[in-house]
Image (cartoon, rainbow, N blue to C red):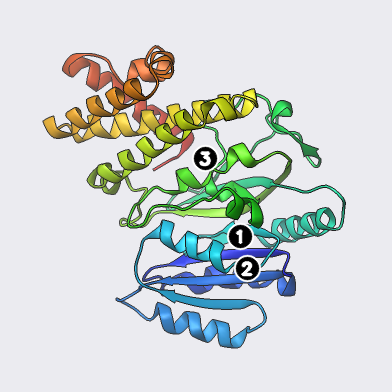
Amino acid sequence: MKLLSIAIPCYNSADYMENCVQSLLVGGEDVEIIIVNDGSNKDNTAEIADRLAAEHPSIIKAVHKENGGHGSAVNTGIENATGLYFKVVDSDDWVQEEAYMKILDTLRNIAGGGQALDMLVSNFVYEKEGEKRKKVMHYRHILPEDKFFTWSECKHFPKAHYILMHSVIFRTQLLKDCGLQLPEHTFYVDNLYVFEPLPYVKNMYYLDVNFYRYYIGRADQSVNESVMISRLDQQIKVNKRMIDYLVANKSQILKTKRCYQYMRNYLEIIMTVSSALCIKADTEEHLEMKKELWQYLKDADKKLYIWMRNGIMGGAMNLPGKLGRKVSVEGYSICQKIFHFN
C-alpha cells in the first residue's frame, strides 16, 4: 500500500500540469499520483497524462473520464486512491520540496505507530501573480504543533482563517466511510470537501511548514471575483448544501462542541462571501438571491439564523438601502486586501 495518494484534477491543464506533477514526483515510491483528466478537449492534457504515467508507471496513474467538474474529478481521485492518506493538488499549483519531505516523514512515522490519524494540517502560501510578498496561511497559536490533538485542544479560529483544501491531508478510508460525494458540474465544492468530513475527524496533527503553493492570477480562475459573480448560482448551491449538512447533523456534531463551533463559523464566512458577491453584482436578481439565501437559513434553523444575522458579519451584509450596500461592499473589499483572497 502507498503512503499518500495525491489526486490532480486536470481540465485543459496542458500549460502547467507538468510543473505540478514534477513537484510531487520527488516523494518517490511512497506516493501515488493520480492524474484525473476530466474530459479535457482543448489541448493535449490527456496525452501528457498518459506520457507521464508511462514514464513513471509505479508512481503515476492516468485516469480519463467525461467532464464532470472539479468535484467529480476529486470523487474519481478518492475512488482510485490506494494510499493510506489522501491529498488534492490542483493542476496549476505545486508543493515545496522540503516541507513535502517533512510531511512524508511524519506520515510514515505515524503509520508505523498505534494511533490512527484522521487529518493532517499544514500551511499554504498564496502565490498571487504580481505580488512579491507572499501571504502565508498558517495555524500557529490555533492548533497544537507536532503532536496528536483533538477538537477540544483547538483554540478559536480568527475570522477568515480556516482550514482549506490546500491545508489538509485526510485519511483515505475516512473520506470513503463518511460517504463524501461532491456534486458534479459545480464550482466551489472545495468548501464541502473541508466541511462534510469534519464530524468524522477525531485525531489531528499540525505541521508548521509552508507546503502547498496556491497560485492565483489567471483571469479564468474560479476564484477570480468576476468569475465568481457570474457563477453565483453555484456558490449559493454549495452554500445551501453546507446549511443542510450542518442542520441535518447538528445533534451529532454538537457532541463535539468545538467542532460544531468551527463548522458554524466557517458557514458564516461562506454566507458572508455569497452575500457580498450578490451585493457587488448589484442587480435586482442578485439582491433577491441574497434575500432568499438568508430566508433559506432561517427556514432551516431559526436559532442559527438569529445568531448569524445578529453577528458582525451577518449584520454588515444586511445593512438596508443603497448606502448600506455600499458600506457592505467597502468592508468586504478591505477584507480582501487583508486576507488576500480572490
Which amino acid lies under the numbered mark 1 shown in the image of this protein?
Val
Residue sitting at x 67%, y 46% = 119
Q: How many marks?
A: 3
Residue sitting at x 71%, y 55% = 99
Quadrant in the picture for residue 79 = bottom right
Compared across the picture, whether 217 is left or right of 124 comes to left
User: What numbered label is drawn on residue 195?
Assistant: 3
Whether residue 171 appears in this view of the structure is no
Check whether the beta carbons of the residues at disc 2 and disc 1 lie within 8 A of each other: yes
Whether residue 188 appears in this view of the structure is yes
- Quote the CA–CA distance across marks 3 and 1: 23 Å
Badge 3 or badge 1: first in the primary sequence: 1
Q: Residues within 10 Å of mark 3 (few under 14, many from 20)?
A: many
Name the image quarter holding the N terminus.
bottom right
Residue 35 in the image: state x and y as whole percent: 51, 72
Which amino acid lies under the numbered mark 3 shown in the image of this protein?
Phe
Mark 2 sits on what residue? 24
Check whether the beta carbons of the residues at disc 3 and disc 1 lie within 8 A of each other: no
- Quote the CA–CA distance across marks 2 and 1: 7 Å
Identify the element where label 3 is drawn: loop
Against 173, residue 251 (above or below) is above
Q: Nearer the viewer, mark 3 or mark 1?
A: 3
Identify the element where label 1 is drawn: strand
Identify the element where label 2 is drawn: helix
Mark 1 sits on what residue? 95
Against 268, residue 39 (above or below) is below
Which amino acid lies under the numbered mark 2 shown in the image of this protein?
Leu
Against 237, residue 307 (above or below) is above
The residue most toward the left is: 284
Residue 175 in the image: state x and y as whole percent: 59, 52
Quadrant in the picture for residue 229 = top left
